[in-house]
Image (spheres, rainbow, N blue to C red):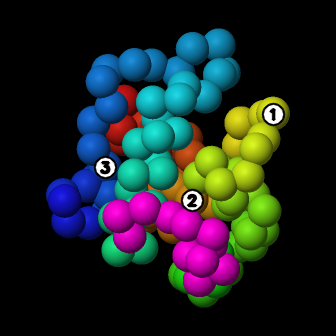
Amino acid sequence: MQPSDFKCVIGLKSEGKKLVSGKRLSSEIELLKKQVYVKAGLKSVGLADIASLTAQIKKETNLDLSQVTMSRLFGLTVSKFGPSLFTLHVLSVYCGCESWDTFLQVNT
């Protein structure tokens, strides 16, 4: 897959699932993570990649995500909770969308 294969610069179709009652669906979050991989040119994210990925996101969006947040998102650190709306927003902007809402509109 190439970044040009996506909408919002990036955008695969999810499996037609809709946002229900304001809950973020895991399929859309997984799709966003997949698009982060493609945009960053990575096949996977390890602890060694987190620092450079967060720096790249900061450089391109002027928005900060902590390394701990990214480690949790990519399953490298245990988390009881899903990502915050801010995290989803920042990653959506990194992938070329205006916001998480725009990402959902384009990809569902």
Q: Give whichever of discs 1 and 3 has the lower sequence position.
A: 3
Residue sitting at 45 percent across and 19 percent down? 18
Asked if the residue at tag 3 contacts the one at tag 1, i.e. Cβ–Cβ closer than 8 Å, the answer is: no
Label 2 secondary element: helix
Label 1 secondary element: loop
In the image: residue 82, left or right of residue 107:
right
Label 3 secondary element: loop
Residue at numbered disc 1? 80
Amino acid type at circle 2 is: Leu
Q: Is residue 64 above or below residue 17?
A: below
Q: Distance between the Cα atoms at labels 1 and 3?
A: 28 Å
Amino acid type at circle 3 is: Gly
The quarter of the picture where the N terminus appears is bottom left
Question: How far across and how far down the image is residue 11, in percent?
Answer: 31, 49
Query: Is residue 25 shown in magenta?
Result: no
Question: How far across and how far down the image is residue 54, in percent?
Answer: 64, 75
Q: Is residue 105 above or below residue 53?
A: above
Q: Give whichever of discs 1 and 2 has the lower sequence position.
A: 1
Q: Residue furthest top?
A: 21
User: Observer-nearest residue: 27 or 44?
Assistant: 44
In the image: residue 62, left or right of residue 26:
right
- The magenta region covers 42-53
Question: How far across and how far down the image is residue 88, in percent?
Answer: 62, 49
Q: Distance between the Cα atoms at labels 3 and 2?
A: 13 Å
- Asked if one can make out residue 88 in the rendered structure from this viewpoint, the answer is no
Residue at numbered disc 3? 11
Q: Give whichever of discs 3 and 2 has the lower sequence position.
A: 3
Residue at numbered disc 2? 91
Residue sitting at 26 percent across and 66 percent down? 3
